[in-house]
């Protein structure tokens, strides 16, 4: 009787493990699609619509802060009746604002990268589904969490599969798909799960992995750039964002003009 109960327990656990492995494979593909396709596309679409305004605003803010600091340095020289050497002041400002300038360059790089991505070739619906289908099967065959005894060569092949998926490289994925043997109909290897305890431990391990991936996906959706999706899904919110940025740009342009006039006036008074 005990043997029958153990046999039934093994059958139930085996079915559970199979279902959990299938769910894990599906979640890994969904999570990677979120990281490598959905989020970059959200960022790209947002940057194309709003990025140039944000870059302009940051550029003007940097110019404003530099002029403000320049005015302070000139005023300090004037109050101390010291000679105002603009070249020296500009050199000092270059050093003080070096990190800000690097940030501005990074923002320009991101903007250009988004524009380039928007102009690139996108996969058709059929190609995209083929890529996902092959990737799911490669994950089932080569993912370290599902296959703890992979060789170094197999691990490297999985890394290449992730890179191909990230790049939307269907041709490379097809090659990896065939080379890895993922194109063959293989059954789950449960030969190492001999006892009910082994199976119960494997079931618990898979459940924990699934929980971790779900939590990871929730975290991704709560952070940049996924949070930009709200603007892409609502035209009125997008318009409001664009208007707010445009208004801030005008404010900075006026403030910069006032600062430039104030600096010119300071220099005139110094020369009088």
Image (tube, grey):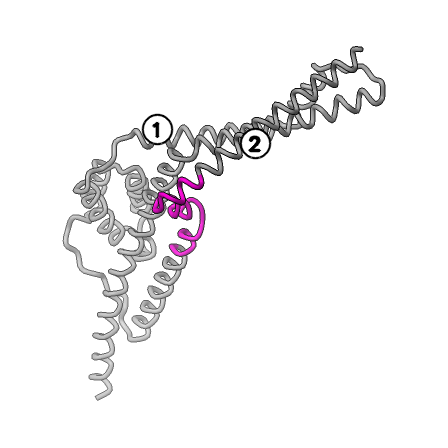
Image quadrant in which you'd find residue 17:
bottom left
Between residues 63 and 159, which one lies in front from this camera angle?
63
- Asked whether, in this view, residue 116 is left or right of residue 80, the answer is left
Q: Which residue is drawn at 21% across and 79% down?
A: 8
Foreground disc of the pair 2, 1: 2
Q: Which residue is drawn at 44% across and 30% down?
A: 52
Which residue is disc 1 drawn over?
A: 116
Q: Which mark is residue 130?
A: none
**Vertical placement of residue 98 versus 185, above or below:** above
Q: What is the span of residues highlighted in magenta in the rendered image? A: 217-241
Queried whether the magenta region covers residue 166, the answer comes back as no
The local secondary structure at tag 1 comes to helix
Queried whether the magenta region covers residue 232, the answer comes back as yes
- Asked whether, in this view, residue 186 is left or right of residue 147, the answer is left
Q: Quadrant of the N terminus?
A: bottom left
Q: Residue at x 38, y 35 (%)?
A: 49
Which residue is disc 2 drawn over?
A: 251
């Amino acid at each position: 009787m005990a043997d029958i109960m153990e046999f039934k327990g093994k059958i139930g656990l085996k079915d559970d493990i199979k279902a959990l492995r299938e769910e894990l494979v599906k979640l890994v593909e969904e999570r990677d699609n979120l990281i490598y396709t959905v989020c970059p596309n959200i960022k790209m679409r947002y940057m194309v619509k709003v990025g140039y305004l944000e870059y302009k605003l940051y550029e003007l803010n940097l110019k404003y802060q530099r002029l403000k600091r320049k005015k302070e340095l000139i005023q300090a020289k004037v109050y101390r009746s010291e000679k105002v050497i603009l070249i020296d002041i500009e050199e000092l400002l270059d050093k003080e604002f070096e990190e800000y300038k690097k940030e501005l360059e990074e923002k320009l790089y991101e903007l250009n990268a988004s524009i380039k991505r928007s102009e690139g070739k996108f996969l058709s619906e059929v190609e995209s589904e083929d890529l996902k289908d092959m990737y799911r099967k490669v994950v089932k065959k080569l993912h370290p969490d599902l296959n703890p005894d992979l060789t170094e060569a197999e691990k490297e092949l999985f890394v290449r599969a992730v890179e191909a998926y990230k790049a939307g490289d269907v041709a490379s994925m097809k090659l990896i798909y065939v080379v890895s043997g993922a194109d063959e109909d293989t059954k789950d290897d449960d030969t190492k799960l001999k006892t009910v305890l082994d199976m119960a431990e494997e079931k618990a391990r898979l459940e924990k992995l699934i929980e971790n991936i779900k939590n990871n996906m929730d975290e991704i959706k709560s952070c940049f750039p996924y949070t930009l999706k709200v603007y892409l899904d609502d035209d009125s919110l997008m318009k409001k964002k664009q208007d707010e940025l445009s208004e801030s740009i005008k404010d900075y342009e006026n403030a910069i003009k006032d600062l430039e006039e104030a600096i010119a006036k300071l220099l005139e008074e110094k020369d009088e």
